[in-house]
């Protein structure tokens, strides 16, 4: 009898224990059918997928309307609507073979429909900086039922990276072809992987069991980190310098802080030529005063690269003829030169009198880049600086205030970008070439001071006969912009994410771009 009871109890335990475990999982764990993602931004960002998109909008656009090509989680270009392509030897023709299958509407994916969709996407760019990057695109032609050709006026080795951008996601009858579809649930964008068979593509066995939904919402920085710490989201993306101090609350058991090895523009754009800023030498004085390493030191970011160049050094095509500025001078010597310019301006002296100036010896009170500086002359220059909101931006403001005070310039912070004399620019490059940087600082970009001479060199480079000639002209353009002192570079931008250890399909990469579809694949 006791033996029979023992057997019965063991059988019951084999049934009840798993049931209890399932009940506990249902009560204490998130929905395993979805991965919860937070992107730092505004609540409506995921649903704004127009040309001027936020990061959340870009992620949704790229997930629901892929282009001819797209990116994988490592930032590599992979097939999308085009399953293969070739590039002609002269680099001026890209020929794409479209995949078999249909648009989401059920209409067949043809060369004519893809051409029309690509032309429509290009037209929406208007004066978007991406339009300047694509200026070498000359013609789109259909060659066969599922073959299109993109002809260029000059070689564009980075064309595939540009075609993979979310702005060039293609739609037909106002719908994209996936790889995911969007369902709105309040403030949450639910992105559901589309079964390939429904698009006329080969079926994937056990599709519902191999993929999961992505629940994406946009939250402000503090709320996103709090949600991660509370276990409500598995991944936080879109972190920038102003939010970085929030990561100090993340314990090692909750997840890891992933920093992308991006390049781009991170520094201050000079917005006008009023007063002190009218003279390029005075604008250079501000750049000389900045202690770049000290600026980022409070963030304890290993591997961050400071630079005084406008274009990130050592990119493809960099001739190496433009080096770091003021390399022969110490910080004290640089600030002594800058201080002399500020004093002359304050006294009303002719700014041209500085030609051929010698490096004066730094006063004892100024030696050491972090020693307290004397109070700036109340009659000296005062500049308004715009920074984004966040504790990291507060740290930047304090550091820049001290740096500028060391040369006699007062700094105040403004909440209105249009009221700013100086404005933080923090932008990740979409392709690793000098042209990207120069296009973002051009007069046509319409954001601050610029150089028409530099723009002229960039225009000449666009029609250069050889890559060597093109590189030389772009180098001249960088030199022109450097002499104009319209931008004060700090170094590389900072992009970070919070990633729980259980998340698959995420990898830091050069573009700081993390598509959602790789995250939707369930680990085997």
Image (cartoon, grey):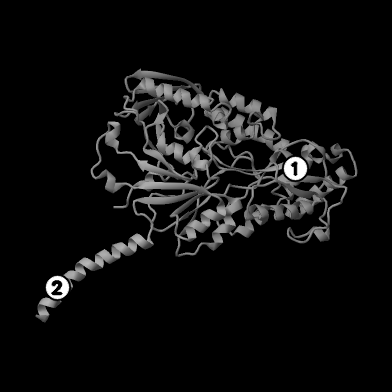
Q: Is residue 456 left or right of residue 222?
A: right
Q: Is residue 461 left or right of residue 110?
A: right
Residue 76 appears in the rendering: no
Image height of 413 relative to 458, above or below: below
Marks 2 and 1: which is nearer the front? 2
Specify the quadrant that holds the N terminus.
bottom left
The label on residue 267 is none
**Which residue is at the front of the view, 41 or 367?**
41
Residue 64 appears in the rendering: yes
Q: Position of residue 44 (x, y in %)?
A: 52, 42
Image height of 481 relative to 32, above or below: above
Between the residue at mark 2 and the residue at mark 1, the CA separation in whole angstroms equals 85 Å
Mark 2 lies on a secondary structure that is helix
**Which quadrant holds residue 381?**
top right
Q: Which residue is mark 2?
A: 8
Q: How many marks?
A: 2
The residue carrying pointer 1 sits among few (fewer than 14), some (14 to 19) or many (20 or more) residues within 10 Å by Cα, namely many
Q: Earlier in the sequence, mark 2 or mark 1?
A: 2
**Which residue is at the front of the view, 213 or 323?**
213
**Which residue is at the front of the view, 18 or 112?**
18
Q: Which residue is mark 1?
A: 284
Q: Position of residue 83 (x, y in %)?
A: 33, 32
* Mark 2 in CB contact with mark 1 (< 8 angstroms): no
The residue carrying pointer 2 sits among few (fewer than 14), some (14 to 19) or many (20 or more) residues within 10 Å by Cα, namely few
Q: Is residue 407 left or right of residue 98?
A: right
Image height of 73 relative to 83, above or below: below
Mark 1 lies on a secondary structure that is helix
Q: Position of residue 256 (x, y in %)?
A: 47, 59
Residue plotted at (75% across, 60% down): 368
Q: Position of residue 463 (x, y in %)?
A: 56, 22
């Amino acid at each position: 009898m006791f033996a029979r009871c023992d057997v019965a109890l063991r059988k019951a335990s084999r049934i009840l224990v798993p049931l209890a475990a399932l009940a506990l999982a249902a009560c204490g764990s998130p929905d395993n059918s979805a991965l919860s993602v937070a992107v730092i931004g505004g609540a409506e960002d995921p649903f704004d997928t127009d040309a001027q998109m936020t990061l959340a909008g870009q992620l949704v656009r790229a997930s629901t309307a892929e282009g001819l090509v797209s990116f994988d989680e490592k930032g590599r270009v992979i097939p999308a609507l085009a399953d293969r392509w070739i590039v002609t030897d002269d680099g001026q023709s890209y020929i794409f073979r479209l995949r078999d299958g249909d648009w989401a509407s059920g209409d067949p994916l043809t060369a004519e429909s893809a051409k029309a969709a690509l032309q429509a996407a290009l037209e929406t760019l208007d004066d978007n900086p991406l339009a300047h990057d694509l200026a070498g695109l000359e013609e789109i032609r259909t060659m066969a039922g599922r073959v299109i050709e993109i002809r260029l006026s000059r070689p564009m080795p980075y064309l595939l990276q540009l075609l993979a951008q979310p702005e060039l996601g293609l739609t037909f009858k106002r719908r994209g072809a996936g790889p995911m579809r969007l369902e709105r649930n309040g403030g949450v964008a639910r992105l559901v992987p589309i079964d390939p068979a429904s698009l006329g593509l080969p079926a994937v066995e056990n599709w519902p069991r191999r993929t999961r939904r992505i629940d994406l919402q946009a939250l402000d920085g503090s709320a996103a980190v709090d949600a991660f710490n509370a276990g409500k989201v598995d991944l936080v993306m879109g972190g920038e310098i102003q939010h970085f101090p929030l990561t100090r609350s993340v314990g090692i058991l909750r997840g890891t802080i992933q920093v992308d090895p991006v390049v781009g523009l991170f520094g201050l754009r000079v917005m006008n030529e009023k007063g002190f800023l009218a003279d390029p030498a005075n604008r250079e004085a501000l750049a000389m005063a900045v202690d770049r390493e000290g600026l980022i030191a409070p963030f304890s970011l290993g591997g961050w690269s400071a630079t005084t160049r406008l274009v990130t050094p050592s990119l493809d095509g960099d001739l190496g003829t433009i080096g770091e500025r003021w390399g022969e001078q110490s910080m004290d010597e640089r600030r002594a030169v800058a201080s002399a310019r500020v004093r002359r301006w304050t006294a009303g002296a002719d700014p041209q009198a500085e030609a051929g100036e010698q490096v004066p010896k730094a006063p004892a009170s100024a030696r050491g880049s972090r020693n307290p500086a004397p109070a700036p002359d109340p009659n000296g220059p005062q500049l308004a600086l715009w920074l984004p909101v966040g504790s990291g931006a507060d740290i930047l403001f304090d550091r820049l205030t001290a740096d500028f005070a060391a040369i006699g310039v007062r700094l105040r912070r403004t909440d209105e970008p249009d009221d700013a004399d100086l404005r933080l620019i923090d932008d990740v490059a979409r392709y690793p070439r000098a042209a990207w940087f120069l296009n973002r600082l051009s007069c046509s970009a319409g954001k601050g001071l610029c150089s028409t001479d530099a723009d002229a060199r960039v225009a000449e480079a666009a029609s250069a006969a050889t890559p060597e000639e093109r590189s030389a002209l772009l180098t001249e353009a960088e030199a022109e912009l450097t002499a104009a002192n319209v931008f004060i570079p700090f170094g590389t931008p900072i992009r970070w994410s919070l990633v729980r250890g259980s998340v698959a399909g995420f990898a830091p990469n050069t573009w700081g771009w993390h598509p959602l579809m790789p995250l939707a694949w369930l680990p085997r």
